[in-house]
Amino acid sequence: MISVNTLLMVAQAARARAYVPYSNFAVGAALQTEDGEVISGSNMENGSYGLTVCAERVALWTAVHSGYKKFVRIAVAADCSPPPAPCGACRQVMWEFAGDIEVLMGNLKGELITQRLASLLPQAFDGEFLARRQESCCAGAELWRLPILFRPVGYTASDYNAPGQVPERYKELLSSIIIDPDLEDGLYRLEEEEKIIVLGYLHQAKGYSLKEERSGRKGEIYGVFACRSPYRPNSISHTVVDLVERRGNVLIVRGLDLLNGTPVLDIKTVQNR
């Protein structure tokens, strides 16, 4: 279960991706689904002010487009006191897709206001007044083509801040993996393993070529799926490392070549054959 504090921190982090050249008022939102996923959003301004879209709607529409239909609560965060409340348009959109959801309104000072949407939008108008038979308009759609959302379970801490800083002897060196405290119970008995698999998102890898000369293959031409290049259609890494020690939600590992701050998508054990 995602804690209130974690949801608020995701909303605060989402502010970093706001597009606010006119107001400089960044707002972040974090929407929690019924099955525990978190989708974020931030406000997107426009020179034609009426076309600006709030963080809450960005998060909701992203979630709905990604296939999520049931939601538990939404956190909204901004640098103001009292904390920000959703605008009228956002309240109506939230009611349309989420019903009487719990709304967490927080700021950078730690102030928090919690209300149900029904109290923020009394006597709400919804689709019940326009009820009609719904038919599928997209039967047979190739849903596998749609992008997939992931939420990192943690991040790496190392001395490498750029690809060129990873030394050739990295397999001998120690680094850390910090797991989200909310997920620490998932590490139970992991310390019994000698080696683990780390799946990371290579956040600094941009662009790729399906086929080209590969430096790790003596300059010969290989396809991207036949090599370990970080420049891939999906910038996901798979690394087997030595688990040296576990300190609560922190894993000390040897042999990790990920840059400092790399989002970690998952931790898995190595299957013994």
Image: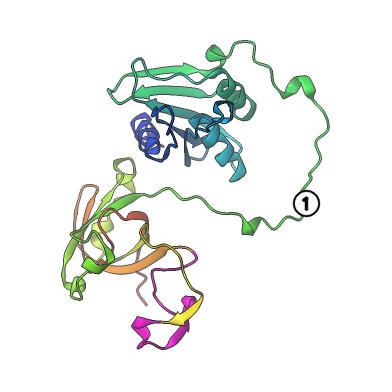
Please check the rendered image and state whether residue 216 is part of the magenta-colored stretch, yes or no.
Answer: yes
Residue 107 in the image: above or below residue 271:
above
Residue 100 visible in the snapshot: no
Residue 143 visible in the snapshot: yes
Q: Residue, x 35% and y 88% (percent of image)?
A: 218
Q: Please state which of residues 54 and 9 is positioned toward the viewer in this rendering.
A: 54
Q: Is residue 192 left or right of residue 183?
A: left
Magenta stretch? Answer: 214-233
Q: Residue, x 56% and y 41% (percent of image)?
A: 62
Give the x, y percent position of residue 59: 52, 36
Q: Is residue 48 left or right of residue 203?
A: right
Kind of residue at badge 1: Ala
Residue at the limit of the structure toward the front, as seen here: 47
Q: Secondary structure at mark 1?
A: loop
Q: Residue, x 27% and y 60% (percent of image)?
A: 259
Please check the rendered image and state whether residue 29 is part of the magenta-colored stretch, yes or no.
Answer: no
Q: How many marks?
A: 1
Q: Residue, x 25% and y 56% (percent of image)?
A: 260
Give the x, y percent position of residue 51: 58, 30
Q: Which residue is mark 1?
A: 139
- How many other residues sit within 10 Å of disc 1, few (<14), some (14-19) or many (≥20)? few
Q: Is residue 263 left or right of residue 50?
A: left
Q: Please state which of residues 7 and 15 is positioned toward the viewer in this rendering.
A: 15
Q: Please state which of residues 256 and 167 is positioned toward the viewer in this rendering.
A: 167
Give the x, y percent position of residue 160: 21, 61
* Image quadrant containing the C terminus: bottom left
Residue 271 in the image: above or below residue 147:
below
* Image quadrant containing the N terminus: top left
